[in-house]
Image: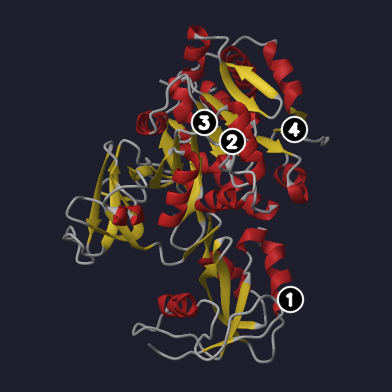
């Protein structure tokens, strides 16, 4: 079975029921099936089965159409982070040797326009603007409507979701059609979504790698409303469309709670809200449940393993400590906690979360033959403890990953950019507390010789990195702490930053761009 068969089957069974809402656009299952048939015919004319379709868009119904059309044409979807700059995107897209591009030319910074030039002669279908090197997306649909529907067999791979390896270099996790469908089916059951429900898709589309998010309502035929996140916009959409289900990042929850428009019953249609992408606080979970009356739960997962563990938390539970848990093992997967010695950890003993099962990737691109798995297990790199009842509690996330506003920033990538600057001898990029984003990207620097201007380093970073990856805090240091193996002790640096919050760090303070700061060095 292909992922796109979900659309075709609903189109036959309930053609006039609503499938997608995006702004003023409203599409029935018949509309969606016909549009994706037309797009699939165009894509099939470009590539043989197995070709890759890179998708770089903001939240839009066309993103989902491209995913379903690629499945119909026996091609592989490659949804990418539209917040990356054009050089980052071009390098990653080049790794998959795409057969075609689907681009949003309305993205900030002319990213889409630049990609067309950088990746020429790869065929591009574009919307949100015009470029002589691209075919207009809607024109392509009209052309495709005149072609016979494409009836190719299912291609094994469905999606390549780019994440990061241990070096910070993005790696493509490959999910098959069946893995994506298994994840979507399980999540639809977990979220108790039915065909009469309405699902809000305001998380970035590239987060739904493998279709586990927006594919879940599609599996059962629920209506999906697509929009970019803005707290007041989302509140209005929930009210006007009578949204029943949503997945939100913790920073989204906090912004909704802070909005003056949140009160007054506009969120009363919500029945279940799931929070994921970063750790959430018990206070936010409780406040959202009291505001909406919905069941608010948390879901933990990874691109490589989709949903790993989850639970639902009534705010009035007698076991309030469970509000800090990431839940118990998902029924579709095996989840274990492995101690440093390699054996399974005892209750309350820290260990790495590892998972295997129906929603775990086939492997990393290009081989997708188990690379990145250990005897079928995906090793998350996240450290947790498991209590006697099987609930998991994170001890520390992957040491070098910073989660800023629900978006992962890979410290090794930022460090490589900083070390390319002549004024930096050593650096460590870690997280520090941020009331708005949860974590701020913080660069601790040992200058090479003379003084270094943070404003110059900020410009240097912005030339090579997406804005959200650039440091928001800067700290000067005479030397970086190192462990007994001679490696930079990032944990010690992070502990200092988080322990003092906005007070002194080893006798000094963190500062924003252009302001001086220091941190102690030495071996620990």
- Give the crowd class for mark 3: few <14, some 14-19, many >=20 residues within 10 Å: some
- On the question of residue 230 being in view, the answer is no
Q: Earlier in the sequence, mark 4 or mark 3?
A: 4
Element class at badge 3: loop
Query: Which residue in the protein does label 4 denote?
Result: 127
Element class at badge 4: strand
Separation of disc 3 and disc 1 at Cα?
47 Å
Question: Which of these two is toward me, 65 or 377?
Answer: 65
Residue, x 35% and y 33% (percent of image)? 190
| Residue 42 horizontal/vertical position (percent) | 65, 21
Separation of disc 1 and disc 4 at Cα?
36 Å
Q: Nearer the viewer, mark 1 or mark 2?
A: 2
Question: Which of these two is toward me, 295 or 36?
Answer: 295
Query: Which residue in the protein does label 2 denote?
Result: 266
Residue, x 32% and y 54% (percent of image)? 325
| Residue 21 horizontal/vertical position (percent) | 62, 25
Element class at badge 2: loop
């Amino acid at each position: 079975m292909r992922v796109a068969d979900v659309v075709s089957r609903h189109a036959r069974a309930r053609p006039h029921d609503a499938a997608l809402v995006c702004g003023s656009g409203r599409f029935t299952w018949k509309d969606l099936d016909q549009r994706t048939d037309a797009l699939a015919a165009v894509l099939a004319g470009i590539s043989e089965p197995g070709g890759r379709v890179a998708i770089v868009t903001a939240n839009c119904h066309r993103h989902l159409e491209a995913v379903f059309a690629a499945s119909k044409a026996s091609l592989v979807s490659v949804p990418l982070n539209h917040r990356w700059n054009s050089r980052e995107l071009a390098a990653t897209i080049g790794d998959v040797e795409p057969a075609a591009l689907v681009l949003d030319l309305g993205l900030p910074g002319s990213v889409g326009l630049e990609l067309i030039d950088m990746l020429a002669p790869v065929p591009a279908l574009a919307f949100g603007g015009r470029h002589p090197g691209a075919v207009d997306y809607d024109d392509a649909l009209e052309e495709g409507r005149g072609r016979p529907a494409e009836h190719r067999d299912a291609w094994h791979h469905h999606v390549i979701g780019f994440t990061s390896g241990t070096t910070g270099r993005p790696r493509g996790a490959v999910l098959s059609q069946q893995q994506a469908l298994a994840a979507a089916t399980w999540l639809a059951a977990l979220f108790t979504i039915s065909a009469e429900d309405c699902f809000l898709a305001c998380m970035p589309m590239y987060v739904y790698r493998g279709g586990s998010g927006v594919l879940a309502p599609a599996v059962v035929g629920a209506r999906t409303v697509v929009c970019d996140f803005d707290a007041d916009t989302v509140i209005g959409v929930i009210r006007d469309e009578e949204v029943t289900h949503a997945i939100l990042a913790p920073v989204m929850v906090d912004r909704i709670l802070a909005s003056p428009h949140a009160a007054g019953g506009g969120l009363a249609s919500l029945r279940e809200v799931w929070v994921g992408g970063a750790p959430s606080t018990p206070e936010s979970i409780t406040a959202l449940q009291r505001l909406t009356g919905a069941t608010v739960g948390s879901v933990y997962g990874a691109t490589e393993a989709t949903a790993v563990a989850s639970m639902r938390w009534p705010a009035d539970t007698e076991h309030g400590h469970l509000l800090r848990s990431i839940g118990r093992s998902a029924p579709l997967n095996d989840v274990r906690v492995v101690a440093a010695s390699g054996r399974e950890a005892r209750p309350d003993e820290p260990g790495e979360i590892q998972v295997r099962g129906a929603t775990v990737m086939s492997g990393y691109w290009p081989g997708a033959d188990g690379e990145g798995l250990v005897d079928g297990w995906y090793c998350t790199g996240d450290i947790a403890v498991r209590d006697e009842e099987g609930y998991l509690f994170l001890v520390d996330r992957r040491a070098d990953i910073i989660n800023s506003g629900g978006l992962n920033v890979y410290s090794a990538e930022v460090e490589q950019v900083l070390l390319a600057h002549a004024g930096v001898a050593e650096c460590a990029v870690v997280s520090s507390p941020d009331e708005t984003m949860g974590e701020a990207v913080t660069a601790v620097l040992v200058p090479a010789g003379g003084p270094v201007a943070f404003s110059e380093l900020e410009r240097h970073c912005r030339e090579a990195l997406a804005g959200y990856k650039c440091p928001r805090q800067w700290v000067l240091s005479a030397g970086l702490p190192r462990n007994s193996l001679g490696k930079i002790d990032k944990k010690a640096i992070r502990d200092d930053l988080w322990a003092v919050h906005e007070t002194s760090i080893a006798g000094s303070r963190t500062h924003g761009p252009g302001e001086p700061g220091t941190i102690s060095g030495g071996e620990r």
